[in-house]
Image: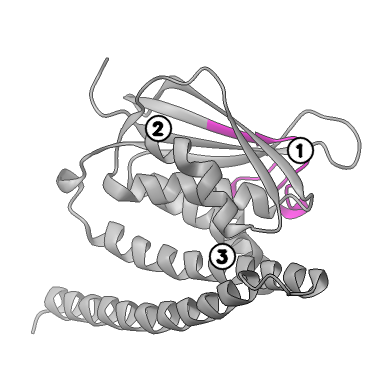
Amino acid sequence: MTGKKAKQGRDDQFAFYMDLLGHDILNNNQAVLGYLELVLATPSVDKTVRKYAEKAFSHVRTSTMLVENVKRLMATRMADPDSLRPFDVMKTLQMSEKDLSRFFPDKRIRVKLNHMPKEIMVIGNSAAEDLVLNVLVNAVRLDAAEDIELAVKVAGTEFRGRDCWKLTVEDTSAVLPPSLKDKDIKYVYLMDSSVAVKLSGLLFAKMISEMLGGDFDAYELPGKGDRPGAGFALTLRRAGRP
């Protein structure tokens, strides 16, 4: 067996194992979510118990997303670039407020879409859908408030000679980790894993966006005080020219 074939065999085995492990974890998480939903659906549940159940629900949903992120990374990494097809992420944005409420039942979240086009067609299949939702979820995770507003804007741009869409998500009360201020997200690779694990969602966004021919970055808003806010910029290849 040649070295190339051996490597391909190991990659296939690793992908199979990750898929198997992912199914196991996702099934366990789904069972836990089912029990938590029963608790939350019980009218007589104490307010304190309900609050803790909502927080637990949020943690399990986020854990599920992390596992799905790994599976998405594997699938995108091995995908043929020519197989990537157009996807309208505007549909994801229109449903995002409802989707985020499922992740964070203990928070009140508003997604403000500013002067959006009817369609935002990008190259990336459903990976683009997962990526946009991931960015929104991570924005909420960096905001400790119970009442959150995310301001979303989109504009045409050029990246590495290609026509792209640039999607920005800003939250004036979110807090960007100090370790990332004024640094590229790839700086996470140099961090201790105990610190980096809290930033895995942002690192996923960076990796997937680059695999799709785009880019991702996080930045601190030019505000004042201890909580100036945080912004997230996602660049994706436009599907065809207008």
**Residue that sits furthest to the left in the current view:** 1
Identify residue for label 3. 62
Q: Are marks 1 and 3 in contact (CB under 8 Å)?
A: no
Where is residue 99 shown, x and y percent of the image?
A: 51, 50
Mark earlier in primary sequence (2, 3): 3
Q: How busy is the neighbourhood of tag 1: few (under 14 within 10 Å), some, or many (20 plus)?
A: many
Q: In the rendered structure, which amino acid carries the disc numbered 3?
A: Thr
Where is residue 58 shown, x and y percent of the image?
A: 62, 65
Mark earlier in primary sequence (1, 3): 3
Identify residue for label 1. 229
Q: How busy is the neighbourhood of tag 2: few (under 14 within 10 Å), some, or many (20 plus)?
A: many
Q: Which secondary structure lies at badge 2?
A: helix
Of badges 2 and 1, nearer the viewer stands 2
- The label shown at residue 90 is 2
Q: Which secondary structure lies at badge 3?
A: helix
Which residues fall within the magenta stretch?
168-185
Q: Are marks 2 and 3 in contact (CB under 8 Å)?
A: no
Q: Residue 206 lies in magenta, yes or no?
A: no
Q: How busy is the neighbourhood of tag 3: few (under 14 within 10 Å), some, or many (20 plus)?
A: some
Residue found 57% across the figure and 58% down from its top: 103
Horizontal relation, residue 163 to residue 58: left or right? left
**Residue that sits furthest to the right in the current view:** 225
Mark earlier in primary sequence (2, 1): 2
Total numbered circles: 3
Q: In the rendered structure, which amino acid carries the disc numbered 2?
A: Met
Residue found 38% across the figure and 77% down from its top: 22
Q: Quick one: 241 or 104, which is closer to the camera?
A: 104
